[in-house]
Image: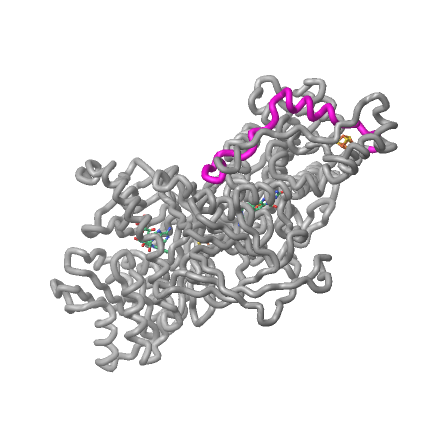
Amino acid sequence: MAADRENGLAEEKETKKKKVVRYERVPMPKQEPEVRRRNFNEVAFGYTEALARDEADRCLQCKKRPCTEGCPVNVDIPEFIAAVKEGRFEEAVRILKRKNSLPGICGRVCPQEVQCESRCTLGRKGTPVAIGRLERFCADWALANRDRVESVEKAPPTGKRVAVVGSGPAGLTAASDLALLGHHVTIFEALHAAGGVLVYGIPEFRLPKHIVQAEVEYVRSLGVELVLDFVVGRAATVDELLAEYDAVFLGTGAGLPMFLNIPGENLNGIYSANEFLTRVNLMKAYLFPEYDTPVKVGRRVAVIGGGNVAMDASRCALRLGAEEVYIVYRRSRAEMPARLEEVENAEEEGVHFRFLTNPVRFIGDERDWVKAMECIEMELGEPDASGRRRPVPKPGSEFVMEVDTVIVSLGTTPNPLIAQTTPGLETTRRGTLVADEATGKTTKRRVWAGGDIVTGAATVISAMGAGRRASRSIDAFLRGLEDF
Amino acid sequence: MYGILEKEKLAPNVIHFKIEAPAVARKARPGQFVILRVDEKGERIPMSLAGWDPARGTIDITFLVVGTSTRKLSLLNPGAGVLNVAGPFGRPAEVEHYGEVVCAAGCFGVGAILPVAAALKEKGNRVVAVMEGRSKAFLFWEDRLRAVSDELVVATGDGSLGRKGWANDVIADLVNAGRRIDRVIAVGCTFMMMECSKATRSHGIPTVVSLTPIMVDGTGMCGCCRVQVGGQTRFACVDGPEFDGHQVDWDLLISKQKSYLDEELRSLNLWERANWHKLMAR
Ligand SMILES: Cc1cc2nc3c(=O)[nH]c(=O)nc-3n(C[C@H](O)[C@H](O)[C@H](O)COP(=O)(O)OP(=O)(O)OC[C@H]3O[C@@H](n4cnc5c(N)ncnc54)[C@H](O)[C@@H]3O)c2cc1C
Ligand SMILES: Cc1cc2nc3c(=O)[nH]c(=O)nc-3n(C[C@H](O)[C@H](O)[C@H](O)COP(=O)(O)OP(=O)(O)OC[C@H]3O[C@@H](n4cnc5c(N)ncnc54)[C@H](O)[C@@H]3O)c2cc1C
Ligand code: SF4
Ligand code: FES
């Protein structure tokens, strides 16, 4: 490390001639693993003003702005960081919001290590600037100093009406952008709360629900009407919405859970991650019996999968009192799609990892409760379509793991309801909607789509970006500037 | 808030509500259900549609008071409302011209089967309605069921009205009497539906049941409602709730319905301790 420091990088020298390059990021205060593994409070406390300014001070203000290129919505990162460094927080918030309507959420849940931070010049020799933490700091500052953040101007009313289906990051972004552009927007949401995965999937300890609530309130404050308990495809079809609205945006996500389809999967004690997380987060089963919805976690829990959802499920299981929690993943550590910070958090909290392992069947007791899981060891073969090496079973390596709760977290696919009830809407083989990448236009006139419903399960920021692009295209269409 | 417009106690443990829910009322079909939540801390609980009025924007539910959620619900009165009502969910009941159809109902199922029986009759079927209850006091809406059927047969467990026995016994009587039955539809508690399916199995009479596994969202998102039918996994909220009774894995369904028994009891005990005076006043 010392040698690294002496060497320095050409670009660093060029950009910041006199300054000492600081390779280590300022740590963010967190709850201790021993404490947090048993509570649902947010794990990371966030930077204080002083810590944020200190971390911002590490930024080299690179001329080439590699970080901005790495950001899916191209936030002007060096600019907002410069503002933080100088303590001009209102300005920092303004810069962030220009490109990202949900900084408080993205700062907490974006996989920065593969986006902006992966490109950071400092990352070549040390740790990248903690861009996500700084983003979170700004958003939290804005929430705490609401009165000091100037309110945005709304364009004069256009008299046009837009229906937004789904209130996840894609829908919320499309709705707020369209409202700011002067259109009348109604969001239709199937569940009893707005926010999509942000409320039913991602747990409180990673994304406190009051943060999501504040974003939803903001969207409503722009005049957006929010209709809950309304399942499009059931209570009204897309065609019926088209009769009343000038345009429809579909942001219904990818909500259908996949199962392993192996024997015994319907035994008691086997949850889909969606069910488990919905009970815990949306229904607040972690507060049972104060809240009415129960959830059952045994002593030994296996979570099948290696994504963010699996990390969230395993950490919820710990917090609900499980003694041993295992992540069972068929590939190796390197292929895990989860956000790095959450894998580290899970490990610190005591979640065990069983890599290169796949269940082949579940074994029940006489009351149809799962009591064990037969697994097989895997090894990595040739790369598959996703570029990751394909796991193949090792013959004869079967073994039995005793478990009393299983959470299947293999990913999700779009709910077919909208596609089935909307003639003219084309889907792909994977069940996602066909939509133009740049505009969100679907194969049906006056219908746009974006987020997980188009990409399959992806990220908050990509859903947000899609909502934003679609709102631009919808606006152009409504103003007669663009044909469908 | 979805306002409660009418409330009627139908039997010692069964209540009827008429609720304002225009979006559901506009689209409801026989055999579908809603999911409701009583209050901010409430569960999402499914309730079959016992009727609806698109013009007035109302729906009807009939419910059996069993645990915390339904007790909370039972305390509400006209003027108040429930926090959430979403739907209509599930595939509508299959309604074709079959010929002679037996519509068997027990407890809350009497409400749920009304729209189905009416639709079947409208399609030109001859509808034999069968209604079961522990005793006379637990029966309700005989008049309504009679109005949508061609024949009504009543059975009570204690023989206080009609045949002594249960719906499955009535079905067995009809079969033994050589009556032609082209289809049976059973709606009620799981045990009753299982017994009705057993009664028709060896006679090869197509029998559909309306399953009530535990649900959360009702939109196909969680998989909580999965049932095993003909060896296959199905989500009752989107693939059902109506399934072939001869293909259902009943043991698994019953054990799954009991999977939160400890928690339900705990919840109920705590709730009753805090609310016993309201229950007394009910
Ligand atoms: C547990 C979990 C953890 C995750 N962690 C991360 C993370 O750390 N970082 C990250 O970037 N991404 C993460 N993701 C992925 C991310 O949350 C999603 O990619 C993102 O939420 C997609 O946004 P969306 O708006 O497309 O859909 P969603 O957020 O899925 O919202 C869709 C909304 O539409 C509603 N809806 C569906 N059908 C209908 C209908 N017919 N009528 C009306 N409403 C309907 C749904 O109820 C829902 O509210 C995670 C996902 C999960 C499940
Ligand atoms: C499609 C469908 C239609 C239904 N229609 C009716 C109806 O018209 N009238 C009626 O009285 N009941 C109906 N039920 C059953 C009703 O939903 C349950 O009785 C109710 O949820 C019990 O809640 P509780 O808190 O009072 O009881 P609890 O003490 O929580 O549970 C009592 C029993 O009810 C069942 N149950 C509990 N929670 C749920 C849940 N979230 N979803 C489904 N079942 C649950 C369990 O088997 C449990 O053992 C229906 C269920 C389904 C799935
Ligand atoms: S965040 Fe990193 S890449 Fe971006 S300007 Fe600062 S040092 Fe350079
Ligand atoms: S209730 Fe969640 S999938 Fe059926």
- On the picture, is A360 further left or further right than A290? right
| Whether residue B180 is situated above or below residue B208 in the rendered picture | below
Residue A31 visible? The answer is yes
Q: Is residue B238 magenta?
A: no
x and y percentages locating residue A416 in the rendered image: 56, 57
When asked about the image quadrant of residue B20, the answer is top left
Give whichever of A178, A401 is nearer the camera: A401
Q: Quadrant of residue B105?
A: bottom left
Q: Is residue B86 left or right of residue A69?
A: left
Characterize the magenta stretch by its predominant secondary structure. Answer: loop
Question: Is residue A412 among what the camera can see?
Answer: no
Query: Magenta span covers which residues?
Result: A36-64
Residue at position x 22%, y 58% from top? Answer: B143
**x and y, in percent, of residue A279 in the image:** 44, 46
Compared to residue A291, the image places residue A223 above or below, namely above
From this viewpoint, which residue is outermost toward the bottom?
Answer: B178
Residue at 31% in and 36% down: B80
- How is this picture coloured? one colour
Q: Where in the figure is residue A330, as x and y percent of width and height?
A: 60, 59
Residue at image x 63%, y 34%?
A: A107
Where ligand 1 lies, by quadrant? top right
Quick one: quadrant of the N terminus of chain A? top right
Give percent across and percent down for residue A118. 74, 40
